[in-house]
């Protein structure tokens, strides 16, 4: 039984956990999710930041910022 548990632990895929955390961050803080996914401040980060800052002017744009961050996290863009 101990061998089975050790084998199950070693086979755990942390990629799924990382993706889930990035999705949660993309909903709460889109620029942070994009930065963590890309690993640097690049044009995708700035686009996400600008879209997020536009939330203060027009709150429905938050959904656009979240959608863009999710596209970056899932590597569509």
Image (cartoon, rainbow, N blue to C red):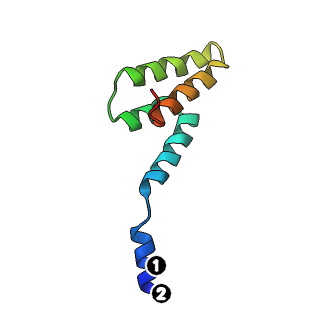
Q: Are marks 1 and 2 in contact (CB under 8 Å)?
A: yes
Q: On the image, which quarter does residue 27 sit in?
A: top right
Residue reaching furthest to the front:
76
Q: In x, y percent, where is residue 35?
A: 40, 33
Badge number at residue 43:
none
Residue reaching furthest to the left:
40
Q: Residue at x 41, y 77 (%)?
A: 6
Q: Say which element carries label 2.
A: loop
Mark 2, other Cα within 10 Å: few <14 / some 14–19 / many ≥20 = few
Q: Marks 1 and 2, how far apart in space?
A: 6 Å
Q: Residue at x 53, y 18 (%)?
A: 51
* Front residue of 9 and 34: 9
Q: Residue at x 48, y 52 (%)?
A: 16
Q: On the image, which quarter does residue 64 sit in?
A: top right
Q: In x, y percent, where is residue 8?
A: 45, 73
For the C terminus, the image quarter is: top left
Residue annotated with mark 2: 1
Q: In x, y percent, where is residue 67?
A: 57, 27
Q: Is residue 71 above or below residue 55?
A: below
Q: Residue at x 53, y 33 (%)?
A: 70
Mark 1, other Cα within 10 Å: few <14 / some 14–19 / many ≥20 = few
Q: In x, y percent, where is residue 59?
A: 66, 19
Residue annotated with mark 1: 5
* Front residue of 69 and 8: 8
Q: Say which element carries label 1.
A: helix
Residue reaching furthest to the right:
60
Residue reaching furthest to the bottom:
1
* Front residue of 13 and 53: 13
């Amino acid at each position: 039984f101990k061998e089975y548990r050790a084998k199950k632990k070693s086979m755990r895929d942390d990629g799924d956990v990382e993706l889930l955390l990035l999705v949660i961050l993309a909903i709460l803080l889109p620029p942070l999710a994009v930065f963590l996914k890309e690993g640097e401040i690049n044009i995708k980060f700035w686009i996400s930041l600008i879209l997020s800052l536009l939330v203060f002017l027009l709150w429905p744009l938050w959904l656009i910022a979240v959608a863009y961050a999710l596209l970056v996290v899932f590597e569509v863009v």
